[in-house]
Amino acid sequence: MASNIGYTAADRDFLAAAAQACADCAGAIDDDSLEAWPDYFTDDCVYRVETREGRANGWAIGLMHCEGRAMLRDRVLAIRHGNVFDPHTYRHVLSLPRFAPAPAGGQRGTELASARRVLTSFNVTRVMKTGEMTLFAVGTYDDRFVEADGRLLIHERTVVLDSRNLDTLLVIPL
Amino acid sequence: MNTPSPVETDGLFRWPDEGLARVPFRVYNDPQIAEAEQKLLFQGETWNLVCLDLEVAEPGQYRTNWIGDTPVIVVRDPVADRIRVFVNRCVHRGSMLCLEQHGKAENFTCMYHNWVYSLDGKLQSIAFKRGVRGQGGMPADFDITQHGLRELRVDTIRNLVFATFSSTLPPVRDWFGPRMVWSLERFFHKPIRLIGGYTQVLPNNWKLYAENVRDSYHASLLHTFFATFGLNRLSMDGAVEVNEAGGSHLSWSKMATDDAEGTDYASGGLRSMRDLAIEDRRLLKTWPEFEDGITHMIQTLFPNVFLQQIQNTLAVRLLVPRGLDRCDLQWWVFAYEDDTPEQLRMRLMQSNLVGPAGLVSLEDGFIGNAVQRTTRGDQGHGAIVEMGGHGVTTERQSRVSEAAVRGFWQQWRGLMGF
Ligand code: FES
Ligand SMILES: [Fe+2]
């Protein structure tokens, strides 16, 4: 079985920084500071939302696919000015991050921690302005980070939803 | 259909005298109407989409789904090499037979007491049929040949697999009519493959979504993404076509398309009202996929199937009612087998415009609920559906019409006896 046993001190430092980046990014969304959300990504990032089923099937199309920070900014602009929807906010609850396990029989990576995939589980509750609260999304962030100017930025984020069901619509990013 | 429905004989519901131009809000929230729909539509005289044929391409491959409230199994019978559809319910005490959405089977074995069915639906064996050491067991006169799975009639058009409980309904091609079949053959004119899929849970009565897709009037009004960012394109030709029964329709248009550069349509009188612009226009890049020049084709098949070609995004959707104020919209996103990598990439970028997170049309996910919320205290009121007149005619020039919505109600009323 694939597993992660024994983190080095450097691994732990890296994961702590990754956890901080994930928390800050989720916080920007939950605080409705959506304009700040793209700043947690690299200029040439990929941000994608797909389902676990879609990933298992190797499907090209998920629910969202943005390439580059400009596309993230466009999403935010559309939320503010272009799209019409029932007003709501999110509340993310994140797990500690972990490295994606090396495949069975594989070697533990000798590559830089920053090149490795970091997995973080999330729960997102959607809170409508009317007060109604719903468990909206459960899944995993599958991330790769890049260090730039002393900051850890998300270079690739695949939001993998555990369920194939999506309630109503997805307009605010996860 | 002249048989009065149970709802009507109770004196509880009558369609208003104005006819198709009024839709009583009650139809979206009356439990008796919903119950009658199960019997008269989904288990009655309709063809229901159950899956795409590629999901049951191999012998023994199955897919489960729902026809209204009824769970069904679609399976390729390896002996007859044809698709069969059964009610997904063990005849013994009613346990669901297949729990998985997809799978491959040699037989169907019920997990509860191990009754076994062959893939043609026949009951093959019963555990402890003769009892244990001569004690117990089924009575000697219990005839297993009399107790197979309930089988439905099956018919296909290209990749779409339909089933019906009716033994008298004409074949699907005749039922939907030639113009609907023409469009389906256009959608599936060459081999396809699945490239995506999800289920969008809609918090509204299924008919509100069925109306929404038939309503080409709302397109530029509810969906403001293109207008906000000055991306509206000229529509050069188009029509809303309704089939003879009324409930199925095509809405198509030929829009000015962008070439590969794809950036300069924000000219003339089509500028953004607020001078807002999106930064990255890669998601607008398209190619003319069909020789007929049609860039947008929305098709509905009565009662609950939707097909789309929105530029190069292609999808089939099936809407399954889940009680009065919920329905599940299953999406199959597809491409053609011979897509080039560039074409697949354009489909991927354009996928940001459609679907539950689609910049251009995500509003459709919640607008049904905006209506649903007001219908509980309806005070006998109903919707006004008069855009484009009172009839169910095909509109050649303007797509600002609710003709296809009226068509839906025409067929619905016919089958429901209202
Ligand atoms: S319910 Fe299926 S075997 Fe008893
Ligand atoms: Fe719409």
Image: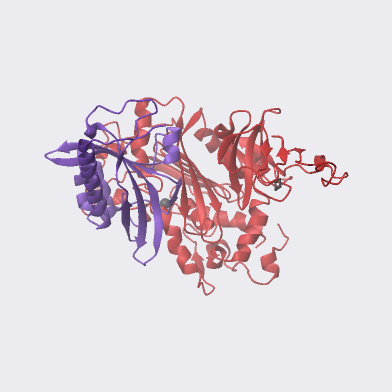
The residue at 51%/27% (across/down) is B191
Answer yes or no: is residue B218 visible: no
Answer yes or no: is residue A117 visible: yes
The residue at 39%/65% (across/down) is A132
Image quadrant containing the N terminus of chain B: bottom right
Image coordinates for residue A101, horizontal then vertical, percent: 35, 34
Image coordinates for residue B381, horizontal then vertical, percent: 52, 71
Instruction: Please give the letter of the chain rendered in red.
Output: B
Image coordinates for residue A86, horizontal then vertical, percent: 36, 60
Q: Nearer the viewer, residue B4 or B272?
A: B4
| Colour scheme shown | by chain
Q: Nearer the viewer, residue B272 or A164?
A: A164
Q: Single out the residue that lies furthest toward the right.
A: B141
Q: Nearer the viewer, residue B216 or A11?
A: A11
Image quadrant containing the C terminus of chain B: bottom right
User: Looking at the image, is B34 positioned above or below residue B81?
Assistant: below
Q: Is A54 positioned to the left or the right of B234 in the image?
A: right
Image coordinates for residue B56, horizontal then vertical, percent: 59, 33
Q: Single out the residue that lies furthest toward the left.
A: A149
User: Looking at the image, is A2 positioned above or below residue B239?
Assistant: above
Instruction: Please give the letter of the chain rendered in purple.
Output: A
Q: Is B386 positioned to the left or the right of B175 in the image?
A: left
The residue at 60%/52% (across/down) is B68
Q: How many marks?
A: 0
Q: Is A159 positioned to the left or the right of B115 in the image?
A: left
